[in-house]
Amino acid sequence: MDYSQKLMFILSLGMMILGHGSLRAETQKPEYKAQEVPLNWALEQAKRDTELADYIQANQRPYDWFSKFAFSQTDGTPYIMLKLLPILAPELWGSQSNFLDRVGLFIDEREPSFPIARGIGISVFNRDNPLSAKIDYATFTCAACHFGRAKKEQGKVVYLDGGVNSEFNVVQFRVNVYKTLQKIFQGETDKTKKANLFVAALLKSLETIEAQDPNYFYNHYSYKNIVLDTEYEKKQIELFKERALTLASQFITKTEKNYQALIALRDNSYNHISEKFVAGFPGMVDASGFGTSSAYVNVDGFFSRLLAYFFILPPTAGITDFQAVWEQNKRAVSWDKTKTKFHSGGGQWNGNIPIPIYRNIAAQLSVGLADNDLRVAAYSVKLLDNMPAPVYPFDVDLELAKKGKDLFEQNCLNCHRPNNGTVYSSINTNMDRAQVITEAIRKAGADRLIRICSEKTVIKVYGKETTPCAQYKTVSLKGKDKLIMPDPNDHLGYNALPLGGIWSQGPYLHNGSVPTLYHLLVPTSRPSAFVKSRIDYDQSKLGYSWQLPFSEKDKKTKAYIFDTTLFPAFSNQGHDTDIKQGSKTYKLNWSDDIDGAMALIEYLKTF
């Protein structure tokens, strides 16, 4: 591999972006009408709950791939090793029954027999022959970021399939794993000795668990024809023991590289809030920064590292809130008349990757695995395209909502209509996330995506061979490489997305800097600091409970104080000034019309 090839390879590793793309909309816009206000809210709730349940049942296989299948069959954390973490360092991981609660992954009460928290996938489910003598690996799943929770009265939990997990702290996970190893090493720096110390600690912990519970690792869980019984658990333990030294050495290397990448990203983009950044912000991630910094720390040599510093690391802070991913059909791009370009459609914050299969692959790449199971991305396209948003679980004043409908139609619908691909750059929001992708990162990212999934790539979905990257909406993608990741200059702003399930997506704006929809509509009321990542709900202002002070109860959860003045990327400005287009004025600031704001809020509850 010559130097230019090596540099391109390095750059290609630098693209790990969560993005559900968009392009600029055409001038001609189809006419849309605001959705009607239901006649009876209780009946509407029951109807939509049933529709969602029926949809998941009809799409159970892609739902399972989204929620419990690993991103890889051959890479990740050895599953036995992952579940030994609370034995190795209980002070960092807490309860054995759900040690990942420390990083905001929860046991899903709808499937309590699943042997680990929601958001972790196990590679046994991916294998064509589940009982083959292969080590089980664990990775995060799509559900880690996109299965959320909200609380109703009496503490009843509403699960948000495809929604925002505002409790998940991916940075804390990486830091806690690193700290676990440092506890074991006790200052040892020799590579071989560190591996031996880790193996000894693992085997000792494993011996303790085997004596306590023969089903600790798999909970005798069954999935279709896969039975993870005591016998299966014994076989996995034996395989783990046989390969313990190799697995431990690989895990140490990966963990230390991940930590180095985190520190590189901190020093490059978050040096003013370094301590808080390494503690992590639940419900937020800098996915592009994770990927590019991982590539950066893998570059050897002073001059190569210096070159990589300028070409690989992102120019701005890319941290954003996680995003709901249901109703992707209402965000989808369409072909223009020539079938060579996209128009309309929108996706995630600023629309870096317009084609669904590629943006799902990019999300997988953000985890940093050497090998990725493309079926996860393909099944996710199937699941999310028409997946309904969850219905608002509380009461609605329908008469007030009718007044809000008229106001929405006059002031909001033009932007928040389905499939609006306009990238808005003049609504005064912080632009860091919109500017994070340079041309070098774009080129490397697109090349990386195409190498992973070209028009000729074949995978099996529903038992049949398919080419998931050969076409989009029946049009061939051959020769259309430039559509994979478009020109960054076309995405210097943010999309106005359709608002299905908007009640559950707080805090608002791309950086989660505005706690409720009331504060979004009434910018003069926006607090400079508020409590973030609670799952209790504020029905009056439409968002999660946000009020200070920070309580003793909060300390036992993932909640934290979010200070919007701490860092420019956290600014709560934007979407706060009326917009005039021709003779038409669109009202964004409702500070002088609180009654109108409250009517709008009531209507938005019905989305």
Image: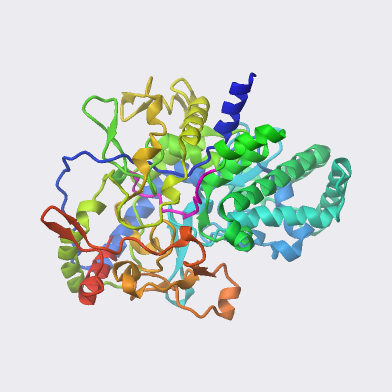
Foreground residue, 251 or 430? 430
Placement of the N terminus among the 4 image quadrants: top right
> x, y percentage for residue 595?
21, 76
- The residue drawn where x is 73% and y is 47% is 80
Q: How is the image coloured?
A: rainbow
Foreground residue, 312 or 155? 312
| Dominant secondary-structure state across the stretch colored magenta | loop
Instruction: Give the image quarter of residue 332.
Output: top left
- The residue drawn where x is 47% and y is 52% is 146
Q: Eyeballing the image, is 486 above or below 575? A: above
> x, y percentage for residue 277?
60, 59
> x, y percentage for residue 68?
55, 47
Left or right placement of residue 362 versus residue 246 in this view: left
Q: Determine if residue 282 is in view.
A: yes
Numbered marks: total: 0
Q: Does the magenta stretch include residue 315?
A: yes
Q: Where does the magenta region start and end?
A: 314-328
Instruction: Give the image quarter of residue 278.
Output: bottom right
Placement of the C terminus among the 4 image quadrants: bottom left
Instruction: Give the image quarter of residue 245.
Output: top right
Foreground residue, 322 or 97? 322
> x, y percentage for residue 259?
68, 49
Foreground residue, 54 or 193? 193
- The residue drawn where x is 66% and y is 36% is 305
Q: Eyeballing the image, is 62 above or below 10? A: below
